[in-house]
Image: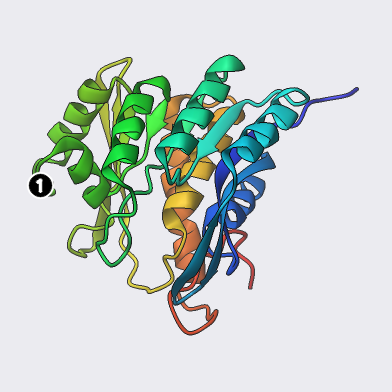
Amino acid sequence: MSTPYHTVLTIAGSDSGGCAGIQADIKSISANGGYAASVITATTAQNTQGITDIHAIPVAHIIKQMEAVFDDIDFRAVKIGMLHSSEVIEAVANTLEKYKIKNIILDPVMIATSGDKLITDEALKSLKSFLPKVTLITPNIPEAELLVGHNINLENMETSAKELGEIYHTSVLLKGGHLELSDEMTDILYNFKSKQSTTIHNKAIDTINTHGTGCSLSSSIATYISLGLSLEDATVKGCNYLNEAIEKGKDKILGRGHGPVNHFGLA
């Protein structure tokens, strides 16, 4: 008896160091039982210590990549990473709408680890217009602050997640990884459809190997949705998976900077 793959498409940039971006997405999707296909929006010259160059893929070719896979494969979920310009955002949004794609998980990559903004004001405006068309966004604290316009802390996380959801008409996973390190990690899921909030707790892990955590988390959630889980169950399982991958990679060594999580829990 023939059975279909649990297909997930990742639309993101390539990380030559393999820690984040398309490479992390494919590992996370595969580790959680999905079949990964990809559309590359940019290539980066990157390692564990940083990015030295970015090459943007022509918008026409990004559209061609999307059309090629959508014309042939039925995707159960789509994960979107960094979209670096208004033109790319609009091309991706229009193509997804053309093919009536559902279950879209967007990781709004807008702030570098250094705190620098990675997105222009024009691109940010286009991104905000796109957000109501996606199923879930997964901002960290600095990204959420940029979207909502005020500071966020542990005390106002739940109300901030709800505020984001109501402003942009989408569900929100507000990630607490940028809060001051304590014994516990707190993430808040706001389900826009049900208007319910879910608090997710995991053990905080002290490690520098966190390169690609946002990519890996959003990809794992997309994968669990492709497997048929509800938004709440997929998000909780995704957060738990990422926490386990961080734990299993906390003492591993790759390069001389911030290493990746251990997606497959390999020794």
**Where 56 falls versus 165 (above or below)?**
below
**Where 146 falls versus 2 (above or below)?**
below
- Can I make out residue 256 in this image? yes
Residue occupying the point 69% across, 36% down = 65
Q: Residue furthest bottom?
A: 256
Q: Nearer the viewer, residue 238 or 85?
A: 85
x and y, in percent, of residue 199 in the image: 26, 38
Identify the image quadrant of residue 145: top left
x and y, in percent, of residue 216 in the image: 50, 51
- Can I make out residue 33 in this image? no
Amino acid type, mark 1: Asn
- Disc 1 designates what residue? 151
Q: Nearer the viewer, residue 111 or 201?
A: 111
x and y, in percent, of residue 2 in the image: 88, 24
Quadrant housing the C terminus? bottom right
* Left or right of 155 in this view: 183: right
x and y, in percent, of residue 211 in the image: 44, 65
* Left or right of 39 in this view: 190: left
Identify the image quadrant of residue 17: bottom right
Q: Nearer the viewer, residue 41 or 226?
A: 41
Q: Nearer the viewer, residue 72 or 43?
A: 43
**Where 113 falls versus 82 (above or below)?**
below
Identify the image quadrant of residue 123: top left
Residue occupying the point 48% across, 50% down = 215
Residue occupying the point 20% across, 64% down = 182
